[in-house]
Amino acid sequence: MSVTLATGLVVAALGVGHAADGRGCHIEMSAVIEAPLEDVHAVVAELARYSEWFPTMHSSAQLREREYEIWFRLPWPLKNVRERIEVADETHAGGASVRWRQLDGDFARNEGSWSLRRVGPARTEVRYDNVVQFRRWVPAWMIARAERRLAPQMVGAIERRANERAAARRQAASAAR
């Protein structure tokens, strides 16, 4: 499936299906963002600010190094959902990854990653991979419908924030000269 935003940004692939172990839902998304890797990484690595751009996240707060408490506002039948997660942030040649796993909370399971790869000086391939299992039954079609609506919003928000950050960096570098 391909979803295109009015800005021309393309979510190249969006998949929602059963998790490999049969427990929960597996959500995959990939897109190419017109922003430098360093700035995209800075956006997806700063979990304490996700509630500013992640469509269903109501709040996020850092509790300790690598540990966050997150509240989501989800549609019926779930409503408000809380979790505490552990996050690992890694950089490597030409890319980066941010991985998380739930430590406790209202989900039965929530684990996943953002994988980032430089595909040009100001282009970044973004891959979102998430396995989520709710404590109550939610039809797969409902999750897929929500993801089709939210994925382009999420990717667009990352691109905007990353480009704002890149512009601020360029402006600071010009002022320092």
Image (cartoon, rainbow, N blue to C red):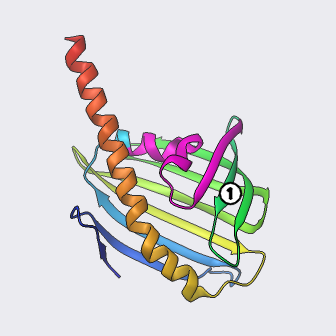
Query: Which x, y percent locates residue 2?
Result: 31, 78
Please name the residue shown 69% across and 34% down the image.
Answer: 65
Please name the residue shown 70% across and 69% down the image.
Answer: 79
Residue 48 in the figure: left or right of residue 43: right
Query: Which x, y percent locates residue 53?
Result: 47, 51
Give the residue at mark 1: 101
| Quarter location, residue 110 | bottom right
Residue 118 in the figure: left or right of residue 96: left
Q: Where is 166 relative to 44, above or below?
A: above
Q: Where is 67 relative to 19, above or below?
A: above
Residue 51 in the figure: left or right of residue 87: left
Q: Is residue 87 magenta?
A: no
**What amino acid is labelled 1 in the image?**
Arg
The residue segment tinted magenta is: 40-63
The quadrant of the image that shows the C terminus is top left
Q: Residue furthest top?
A: 177
Secondary-structure class at tag 1: strand
